Image: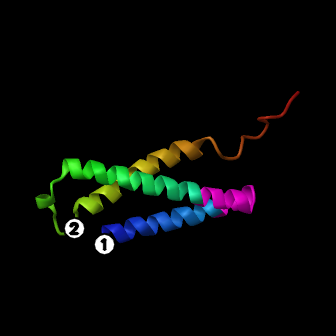
Amino acid sequence: MIPLLVFYIHVVAVAAGFTRRWQEEGLAEGLLAVFFMALIFFVGWSMASFLMKLLLSAGEAHAVLNRDSASLLLLTAGEAVFYAFYLKGEGPSPPGEGERA
């Protein structure tokens, strides 16, 4: 159940990233955002799986939280921090900022 929720969160995030970039910059930027998020997801998942193999042995698998579920949760937490800093600089500028006197 955890992997299903994590994948659903990622599908929603990719759709939101595509839509935001598409509306601001155009179709090419929207597609680049999708490819960038997919790259971060796949590379991050393999790194998180490697870490979970080091931390959890195969015998420690539980019914709800096994190594795969734990690696996906670690990946999602890492991505949340990364995207929070990555998207932090983007946004509407306050009124009056950027105007030259």
Residue pushed farthest top?
Answer: 101
Badge 2 marks a residue whose secondary structure is loop
User: In percent of the image, x 15 and y 59: which residue is there?
Assistant: 58
User: First in sequence: mark 2 or mark 1?
Assistant: 1
Q: Amino acid at mark 1?
A: Met
Q: Amino acid at mark 2?
A: Val
Tell me which secondary structure the magenta stretch mostly adopts.
Answer: helix
Q: Decide if residue 64 is in sight here.
A: yes
Residue on which the image places disc 1: 1
Tag 2 near tag 1, CB within 8 Å: yes
User: In percent of the image, x 41 and y 51: which residue is there?
Assistant: 44
In the picture shown, does residue 47 fall above or below 100? below
Closer to us: 97 or 23: 23
Q: Quadrant of the N terminus?
A: bottom left
Q: Position of residue 15 (x, y in %)?
A: 58, 66
User: In percent of the image, x 51 and y 55: which residue is there?
Assistant: 39
Q: Which span is picked out in magenta?
A: 19-34
Using residue 91 as the reference point, say whether residue 10 is left or right of it.
Answer: left
Using residue 33 as the reference point, say whether residue 27 is left or right of it.
Answer: right
Badge 1 marks a residue whose secondary structure is loop
Q: Quadrant of residue 99?
A: top right
Residue pushed farthest left?
Answer: 59
In magenta stretch: residue 56? no
Closer to us: 43 or 34: 43
Using residue 2 as the reference point, say whether residue 20 is left or right of it.
Answer: right
Residue on which the image places disc 2: 64
Q: Residues within 10 Å of mark 2 (few under 14, many from 20)?
A: few
Q: Position of residue 20 (x, y in %)?
A: 66, 59
